[in-house]
Image: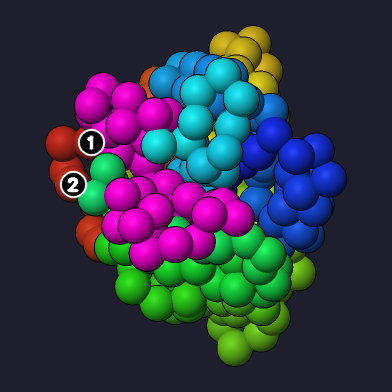
């Protein structure tokens, strides 16, 4: 999952970034409101952590402009201004959560998981697809009654696929949510990681795979029978 942290205090931004990366998120940072707004408008993020007291444009202004533009990315406000009035203002402008500073990282991580669940069909910390289970708290993956070891990038890719199961995802969409760089049509990095995941999670009995290749488009994590009119390359 790709997270944008808009925070002008470098130490705080690095603290959040390092903590979230240990939680296997893909994290990008912006040092001011103008940059944060531009990044949020030009890229797809799964959630935004937005400080209120920012140079250039304050967090409330960034929040308002994002919502006015139709951006529905989940947003958590972070600020030392923890008065009731500030919280009410942020929530009324469209924030999904509000966390006063100073905060304990474990609470931030739990709140982030919470707002991600709200925007996902899965309302639990244990994501499921068929008999595969991915625990977003412990980061353990299970199938066939055994634990499957995943690298950080494999975990990020699998989590995004499961959160969007039964949806056909283009390579460019997957790249934006799992990698920091823009999609390169000449690169086969997604296909390489899909192959690695399949090797680890698929059944060896020859049954249909959970991860399907949709010819000419991208991939789909399957939890229901495939539509007959979709051109699928198993």
Q: Is residue 52 highlighted in magenta? A: no
Residue 173 screen position, x and y as percent: 45, 30
Q: Nearer the viewer, residue 4 or 198?
A: 4
Residue 47 visible, this angle: yes
Give the x, y percent position of residue 122: 34, 68
Q: Pointers 2 and 1 in contact (CB under 8 A)?
A: yes
Q: Is residue 194 visible from the viewing direction of this image?
A: no
Residue toward you, 53 or 20: 53
Taking the spot 83% from the left edge, 45% from the top edge, the residue there is 11
Along the viewing direction, whichever of 84 and 22 lies nearer the viewer:
84
Q: How is the image coloured?
A: rainbow
Query: Helix, strand, or loop for circle 2?
Result: loop
Query: Picture coordinates of residue 37 (x, y %)?
Result: 48, 23
**Residue 227 numbered tag:** 2
Say if 139 sits above or below 121 in the image.
Answer: below
The residue range painted magenta reads 61-90
The relative height of residue 85 versus residue 205 in the rendered view (above or below) is above
Given residues 115 and 137, the one toward you in this image is: 115
In screen coordinates, is 74 left or right of 45?
left
Question: Disc count in the image?
Answer: 2
Of all residues, the one furthest to the bottom in this rendering is 145
Provide the secondary structure element on which disc 1 rests: loop
Is residue 192 found left or right of 176 in the rendered image?
right
Q: Residue at x 76, y 58 (%)?
A: 19
Question: How far is mark 2 from mark 1, CA to CA?
Answer: 6 Å
State which quadrant residue 194 falls in. top right
Q: Which residue was labeled with disc 1?
A: 230
Q: Residues within 10 Å of mark 2 (few under 14, many from 20)?
A: few
């Amino acid at each position: 999952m790709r997270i944008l942290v808009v925070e002008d205090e470098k130490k705080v931004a690095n603290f959040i970034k390092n903590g979230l990366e240990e939680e296997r998120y893909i994290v990008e940072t912006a040092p001011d409101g103008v940059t944060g707004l531009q990044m949020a408008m030009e890229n797809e993020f799964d959630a935004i952590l937005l400080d209120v007291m920012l140079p250039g444009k304050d967090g409330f202004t960034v929040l308002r402009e994002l919502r006015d533009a139709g951006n529905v990315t989940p947003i958590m406000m972070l600020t030392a201004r923890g008065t009731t009035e500030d919280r009410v203002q942020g929530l009324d402008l469209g924030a999904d959560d509000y966390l006063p500073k100073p905060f304990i990282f474990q609470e931030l991580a739990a709140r982030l998981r919470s707002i991600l669940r709200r925007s996902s069909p899965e309302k639990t910390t244990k994501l499921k697809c068929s008999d595969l289970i991915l625990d977003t708290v412990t980061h353990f993956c299970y199938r066939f009654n055994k634990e499957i070891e995943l690298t950080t990038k494999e975990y990020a890719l699998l989590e995004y696929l499961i959160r969007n199961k039964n949806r056909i995802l283009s390579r460019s969409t997957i790249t934006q949510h799992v990698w920091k760089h823009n999609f390169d049509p000449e690169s086969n990095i997604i296909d390489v990681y899909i192959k690695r995941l399949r090797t680890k999670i698929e059944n060896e009995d020859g049954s249909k795979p959970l991860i399907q290749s949709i010819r000419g488009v991208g991939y789909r994590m399957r939890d229901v029978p495939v539509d007959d009119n979709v051109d699928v390359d198993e």
